Image (tube, rainbow, N blue to C red):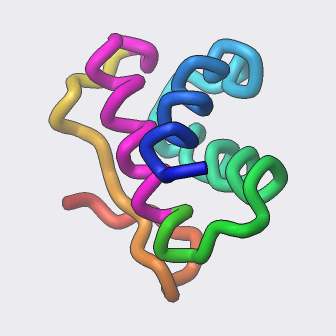
Amino acid sequence: MDLETIINEAADNADDFLSEVSRTGEARPVIRQFLKERHPELSEEEIAAATARIIDVLAAEDFFDGEEHGETMTWRAGEDDSIHEI
């Protein structure tokens, strides 16, 4: 399965696995876990890229409460799970 299909699948199912999440910082580790469980074949770099894209898609759809689209943050492969503003 290509990465874009995985991103679309996750964004389509976000209501289910992000039901308790309202901010991008809370969503990031949940999305990462979802991707790792559903797609163990993905590398850390692919998970990081997909997570960032999923956050962007959901933010554009106003999924997150009180956050503007430009406020998303990114996780960089090889770093700890802390959030780094870009």
Residue 13 is drawn in which quadrant? top right
Residue at the (47%, 64%) spot, across then down: 48
In the rendered view, would you say 11 is above or below 1?
Answer: above
Q: Is residue 76 left or right of residue 41?
A: left
* 61 vs 40, nearest the viewer: 40
Residue 4 is drawn in which quadrant? top left
Give the percent coordinates (x, y) of residue 44. Answer: 57, 75
Give the percent coordinates (x, y) of residue 37. Answer: 83, 53
Q: Seen from this angle, which residue lies furthest right?
A: 37
Q: Is residue 57 magenta?
A: yes
Q: Is residue 61 left or right of residue 11?
A: left
* 14 vs 38, nearest the viewer: 38
* 27 vs 31, nearest the viewer: 31
Name the main secondary structure of what is drawn in magenta. Answer: helix
Residue at the (51%, 38%) spot, across then down: 5
User: What is the total number of numbered labels drawn onto the structure image?
Assistant: 0
Image quadrant in which the C terminus is located? bottom left
Residue 70 is drawn in which quadrant? top left
Give the percent coordinates (x, y) of residue 25. Answer: 49, 45
Residue at the (74%, 45%) spot, across then down: 34
Q: Seen from this angle, which residue lies furthest front?
A: 1
Q: Is residue 74 left or right of residue 34?
A: left
In the rendered view, would you say 45 is above or below 84?
Answer: below
* 68 vs 76, nearest the viewer: 76
Query: What segment carries the magenta color?
Result: 48-65
Q: Seen from this angle, which residue lies furthest bottom?
A: 78
